[in-house]
Amino acid sequence: MPKKIVYIIILSAMIGSSEVLSWKVLIAGSAWNLSVFRLLLLVLFIFTLIKDYRTRTEMSFFKNRDLRFSLVFMFIWLAYAVASFLWVKDRAAWVTGVFFLAIGFISAVLLARYLQSTADILQAVYLMAIMLAFHNLVGWYEVFSGNYIFYSKLFPDRIAEYAARRYPVSSFKNVNDFSTLLLLSVWISYICWQNAGKTWSRALSIALLLSSACLLVQTGSRANLSGLLLSLFVFIVIKAIEKKRIHIVLIVVVSLLLLLILLYPGGLSGLLPQNADALSVSDQARLRLIVNGLHFVSATYGFGVGAGNIGYWLANRPKYVTYLTLMHNWWIEILATYGVVIFILYNIFYWRLFRSMLKKYRHSGKGPEAAIAIAFASFMAGFVIAGISSSTHMTNEWLWVFWGLLIAYQGVSLESDSAAATMKEIR
């Protein structure tokens, strides 16, 4: 039963904005969205704590060294966020910052606790694919019709711009968030394709992959497009190293550069501006945000501004005025918010998680594990760039759940080839 609830949690997290399928509740005088996802996550976490305490259940999943490091880091990160209450300027925003980090930590713990086999991970991937297919259908409807089923109700002030440019956004807060989801959709589709046992399921998986890639291009998100190219490059490099065909890597590099030139004819010259005026307004703002973030780290002696307080500092103590209250950069946001130590630990955590995927790929043969591992590793590589697309990823619950899925996969022991083959036959 708990495992089924985990699957429902994954499905509900992929809905998009927390305002979809949610109820307004008042907590300490503030209005919060109590979504199906948040309710189930909280209930299952409390149930698990009580059950494991009463039965003295040994947390066997915690014995894996890489998994243990990831969960301990997530706990340290959350604890640091809580401790930052001592120096934050905006305590209401601090509550929000801690809340979303808690979602990330609880998601990682629950998924690692209940998804302990390749079959479990695959089932989660298939459920994600269902929701991703739904978002693709909504996205194409928006592109061709200019009508926005969810967005017109959530953010009516932006509809005119989105409709004019035919941006797909589905039920997400903005086109960049949706674009990052589409990047994930490409690799989730790949896993489904590689593990499909029937012709029709392979065809549907390939269709979802191509649809996601085309919609991603339609969003016009440069960071996510670059992330897609980088993830494809890493995918091919991993494959080439496995087959000892390094020359393929050189061909791919040249091909990607040519593709970049075709997609962005003026893009290469734009990478080398002679002065600030050569940058777009958006790029200038992003550069100033980075400088502001580094300034905040210095001003707080390396401790960071504290959970949820980037907005306060950007509004009240910026080095350069940008009129923006979100960092628009995942990496700088972590550094400026949580300080140097957490930033270093996060990068170690990210590298170890990526390395775990590579290890699983090398030792998994050609079973389901290989497709899962290389797809997860490729997405992680692409997210290095894609992470700078959205105004903030801290509030994206679907992304926290996906990181939890990756962490859970760290603790999965590789199954035998016969078990993998059986799994593929079932599908």
Image: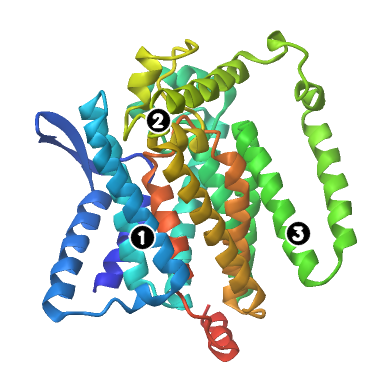
Alpha-carbon neighbours of circle 3 within 10 Å: few (<14), some, or many (≥20)?
A: some
- Marks 3/1 in contact by CB < 8 Å: the verdict is no
Q: Secondary structure at mark 1?
A: helix
Q: Amino acid at mark 2?
A: Tyr
Residue 192 seen from this side: no
Nearer to us of marks 3 and 2 is 3
* Residue sitting at x 64%, y 43%: 227
Q: Which is more toward the observer, 262 or 403?
A: 403
Label 2 to label 1, Cα distance in Å?
38 Å
Residue at mark 2: 151
When the figure is inspected, residue 421 is found, relative to residue 90, above or below; the finding is below
How far across and down, in percent of the image, does residue 216 sit? 61, 40
Label 3 to label 1, Cα distance in Å?
32 Å
* Residue sitting at x 44%, y 31%: 336
Q: Amino acid at mark 1?
A: Val
Residue at mark 1: 72
How far across and down, in percent of the image, does residue 378 sit? 63, 56
Q: Secondary structure at mark 3?
A: helix
Nearest to N terminus: mark 3 or mark 1 = 1
- Marks 3/2 in contact by CB < 8 Å: the verdict is no
Alpha-carbon neighbours of circle 1 within 10 Å: few (<14), some, or many (≥20)?
A: some
Label 3 to label 2, Cα distance in Å?
37 Å
Q: Which is more toward the observer, 285 or 129?
A: 285
Q: Which mark is residue 236?
A: 3
